[in-house]
Amino acid sequence: MNMVKKLKKNITLDNLAGMVQRGFLGVDKKFNEVYERFDKISKRIDGLDNKIDALYLEVSSIDKKINKIDERLAKIEIILLEDHRKRIGRLEEQMQTLQASFH
């Protein structure tokens, strides 16, 4: 027991200051590691932002192209339907004429 009391009494302010300093240096080192990790994460996020921006531009371009294709298909559909209506109308007239000639 005397040895423990003697060790406790022999701690000086310089020793205590050294222990506190080493503790702070350890904490400082950990903070530096955390900051480095945050920097890496920040760079990765910046890279992802750039990729997302590029993808957005690409999707916008594809969307415009699809809209143009939709418009063209709608026009083609109208043309085909009008053409078929005319043909069907003529065929119906011809059928009526043909039926009338057999009656």
Image: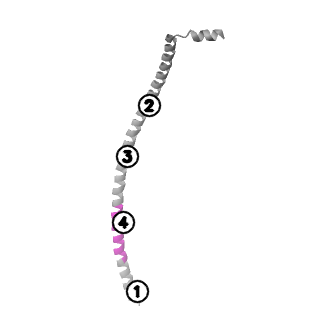
Q: Secondary structure at mark 4?
A: helix
Could you say where residue 30 lies in the image, as x and y percent from the top left?
48, 24
In front of the other: 67 or 16:
16
Which residue is label 4 attached to? 77
| Color encoding of the figure | one colour
Q: Which residues are magenta?
A: 72-88
> Residue beneath label 3, please?
56
| Viewer-side label of 4, 2 | 2
Q: Is residue 87 magenta?
A: yes
Residue kind at label 1, given as amino acid type: Gln
Give the residue at x 41% y 88%.
Answer: 102
Q: Which mark is residue 38?
A: 2
Label 4 to label 2, Cα distance in Å? 57 Å
x, y percent for residue 31: 46, 25
Within-10-Å neighbours for mark 2: few <14, some 14–19, many 20+:
few
Q: Where does residue 12 sit, x and y in percent of width and height?
A: 52, 10
Q: Is residue 66 above or below residue 91?
A: above
Q: Amino acid at mark 4?
A: Glu
Looking at the rendered structure, the kind of residue marked 3 is: Tyr
- Mark closest to the chain's N terminus, 2 or 1: 2
Choose between 56 and 32: the one closer to the eye.
Answer: 32
User: Mark 1 highlights which residue?
Assistant: 99
Q: Residue furthest right?
A: 1
Dot placed on the residue nearer the N-terminal end, 4 or 2? 2
